[in-house]
Image (spheres, coloured by chain):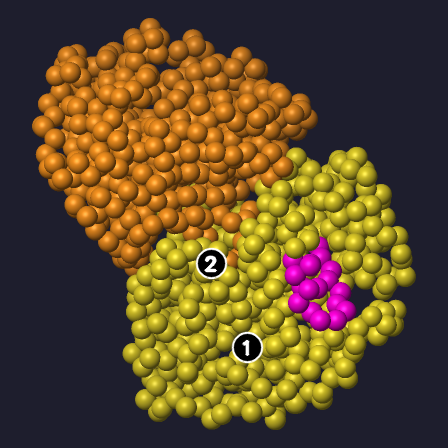
Chain colours: A yellow, B orange
Amino acid sequence: MNLEGEASTVGWARWGAGTNAKTLPDTASTLLAQVLDLAPPPPVVPLAEVAVADCALDGAVLGALRRALGPDNVLTTRVARARHGSGMSTPDLLRHRQGRVPAAPQAVLRPGDHAEVLSILDICSRFGVAVVPFGGGTSVVGGLTPSATRHVAVDLGRLNGLVAVDPLSRTATLQAGLRAPRAAELLAEHGFTMGHVPQSYEYATIGGFAATRSSGQASAGYGRFDDMVTALTIATPRGTIRTGRAPASAAGPDLRHLFLGSEGTLGVITDVTVRIRPLPARSHYEGWRFASFADGLHAVRSLAQDGPRPTVLRLSDEAETMIGATGSGRSDGGCQLIAGYEGADVRPTVEAAAAVLAAHGGVPLGEESGRQWARHRFDAPYLRDALLDAGAFAETVETAAYWSALPEVHDRVRQAILGALPDAALVLAHVSHVYETGASLYFTVICSPGSDPIERWRRAKAAASDAIAAAGATISHHHGVGTDHRAWYAAEIGDVAVDLLRAVKQQLDPAGILNPGILVP
Amino acid sequence: MNLEGEASTVGWARWGAGTNAKTLPDTASTLLAQVLDLAPPPPVVPLAEVAVADCALDGAVLGALRRALGPDNVLTTRVARARHGSGMSTPDLLRHRQGRVPAAPQAVLRPGDHAEVLSILDICSRFGVAVVPFGGGTSVVGGLTPSATRHVAVDLGRLNGLVAVDPLSRTATLQAGLRAPRAAELLAEHGFTMGHVPQSYEYATIGGFAATRSSGQASAGYGRFDDMVTALTIATPRGTIRTGRAPASAAGPDLRHLFLGSEGTLGVITDVTVRIRPLPARSHYEGWRFASFADGLHAVRSLAQDGPRPTVLRLSDEAETMIGATGSGRSDGGCQLIAGYEGADVRPTVEAAAAVLAAHGGVPLGEESGRQWARHRFDAPYLRDALLDAGAFAETVETAAYWSALPEVHDRVRQAILGALPDAALVLAHVSHVYETGASLYFTVICSPGSDPIERWRRAKAAASDAIAAAGATISHHHGVGTDHRAWYAAEIGDVAVDLLRAVKQQLDPAGILNPGILVP
């Protein structure tokens, strides 16, 4: 990110920029044109022409911030502010394409250390200016669009160092603004990895992973980001909290978990200490086919509960398998499973897991289908750009549930989305995060945009969220709450817990400046 | 527990009663008499003669409680109240032996369901009577002795059912007052186990495990109790909180972790849903010897970080190994390690782990030493009774630290205890809970009682706690905070976090009735 607040690679109104862009396979384009009522998309308004009102902060606030951070680190240009005005949901991108940034910050602040973050919180508390912590800007749930009338974005991009590595204890302290690929490079220099590879990997940051309880594609082997965090440093308007004195403790409630998932509403995470593991010497990916999603779920559950555990485990339902196959020209039917293995010597695990998968009716598809998944593991958001360019609409919904509820959740959410969309839509789903007691479900919806795709999706998403709630699942497995899931989140945790979170916020953030309206109204 | 509030087996002023009592091996008695200045203990004041003042609650409170619970479930007898007046630390037992119960509750309440717990909280909030949730009564950190002038104990013994089992998701919902052995029986009827076997197993309850973040002897294989909990139901003065909608979630902070470890200060846990596993078909325990504690630590760290993971992993330091050997007549020197394995087919893991242990210089001692440990796994608190009977003093200190800090923590805490005790003392230690990033350290101290053993221990424990803090370790790995660790806990989490916990308590418990003075002053 340069002084204009330009990310080096992220596009405007799209995930991928320039050379990173992906195109849809011809077969997929043909299929989509047959199935959906595609509408030629309106032209994209360039970033330079996006309407952003002038900065409305008065000189006293800006002066105080400039003194605290240095004038170069208080950006008020329209471009910098537009770039920090929302996340990366499809509605966000569509608004950007239309030249709209409904919640542009008044300024973009670039603190250089923890003390400067504390200064920002102090100044903004005194002047009543809301603060939105900004990492990779990849929220897909409205986590960067607070309800405040004026706010500043705190871009943590300058907090991008590896603070410490303890190779004996296998921990590393990383600054919050480090993007995942750079964090991986820095750890690799010491021979280690976090193993945290979510789909947002290319842009997302360490602090964002913590603030939103991220989960990566290799969570079966490496765990969720929550599981990796051993300590956090958090700047709050009341001062600093440092959690995580030991690998495990019975000294009171584990306060790490109050800030993991707090989405910037309780403080600004400035560094994160994570458990690290040696870089794996080997990796192996392979595909399997199951006759049905139900059969595949049995197999996946068996591995999750009784092992052996692959590092990556991803089961597509029939619809996702079919659409995935259109690109490769395969048409095996059934459901595809991808199993990935990373470690010092993966062969015994590969063989033991293969025996389990075969015992549950799995048919091996070989390494090439696994390698193909690995090559394209970050493609989905680029393909979303391509779908929007092609005049379609694409967005995702995700949840998690206990194993016994999973088939019903899959069915109800699918039906709810299909029922809420008035014409043809593709609803694809996969399981990609498994636990002993249950798993995630990730739905991709591809449909016609209609005349008002944002409002159309709002209704479909509400129907999906209602179905998730009715089926007893959680409103988010790894995207977070933001503003989009707020109502369902409140219902999920109940009034007593909502009031509790409000009291926690009131204590740490008495002026109510931190990401107001996110998580809890 | 009958209507007099008598536990069926627990003794008075001692852990074990009657037939459960253990005696010291003759060799150990001889050694102790040689090393320590043993003092013949004063006679134990029988329970019936313990001084407990009359119940001071007025008729209005008692009337409201009796109407809510039924008169049989509001006990005001001296015996019931004495039995609910403290935990099981050595100072607690010494006071009991002297006929003292400094914090006897005014009444012992026995709610029959969650709604009755809510009623108790409502009545006690209105009348300003403090409430101490009481499970197994095994706290060793003063967790049952609040700072209130008058309080009631809420004995959860009637909440002793298995509510639900979901064999597919491998979860079970257990009521909070279930003692661990009964919980194990109920789960075994369905073919499952929690695998949670702390030393307090015989008396401790499910709710207590959750409220204190318990960790069991098989934590290397089954995890800490925190890890097992998927959901909690908590009665608070503000109403009910139900957490744990899914196996994993990114929907806001994980509120389970605000109540795990809350030690009854934020609410009364009434049921706990835990992850369960199939009853293991096989178990295997074996002993190993290492030349030094440092060598053993390397071996244990290797298994914890790179596997294979035994289910039980326990490494004694030189002193503990020597004292342990006095009972069996062995005198191999070095440090003893116990490795236990449970599962469907343990042999491959046993062999793979043996290769790792041997590569780190371990010498196998065979299965008998492992079986001996397993036979005596619950003996320590009984042996404490025997030591007190023999005129010695015995108590424990425990902590956890990252691997790189562990040797220094071991050394500093040992030295601090020895330095604080004016004459000879035995300080034995072991590692019994391992993590990828670190491990626990558990110290057993055996010394002369002196003229005022309680005050003498207070000073030694303070020195140990100061050393733990100075070495950067946590003030408790699995005993909790209670009143004994309060000052060090506050320093460990810092002022901002202490104020945060106070705000949480103020929100959930505005009348301040829940275990006042525990955890945070």
Residue B314, placed above or below residue A433:
above
Q: Nearer the viewer, residue B99 or B367?
A: B99
Estimate how packed mark 2 is, as few (under 14), some (14 to 19) or many (20 or more) residues with alpha carbons within 10 Å.
Answer: few
> Mark 1 is on which residue type?
Ser
Q: Position of residue B233 (x, y in %)?
A: 41, 43
Callouts 1 and 2 on one subunit: yes
Q: Which quarter shows the N terminus of chain B? A: top left
Q: Furthest-top residue in view?
A: B26
**Left or right of residue B298: residue B269:** left
Residue B48, placed above or below residue A35:
above
Residue at (41% x, 83% y) in the render: A150
Residue B65, placed above or below residue B452:
below
Q: Nearer the viewer, residue A12 or B396?
A: A12
> Mark 2 is on which residue type?
Ala
Q: Secondary structure at mark 1?
A: loop
**Left or right of residue A385: residue B317:** left
Q: Position of residue B75 (x, y in %)?
A: 21, 27
Q: Secondary structure at mark 2?
A: helix
Q: Position of residue B416 (x, y in %)?
A: 27, 35
> Count the marks: how many?
2
Q: Position of residue B375 (x, y in %)?
A: 47, 14
Residues rendered magenta in the picture: A413-430
Separation (CA) of disc 1 from disc 2:
25 Å
Residue A128, placed above or below residue B473:
below
Residue at (58% x, 52% y) in the render: A471
- Mark 1 or mark 2: which comes first in sequence? 1
**Residue B485 visible in the displayed image:** no
Residue labelled with disc 2? A491
| Closer to the eye: label 1 or 2 | 2
Residue labelled with disc 1? A86
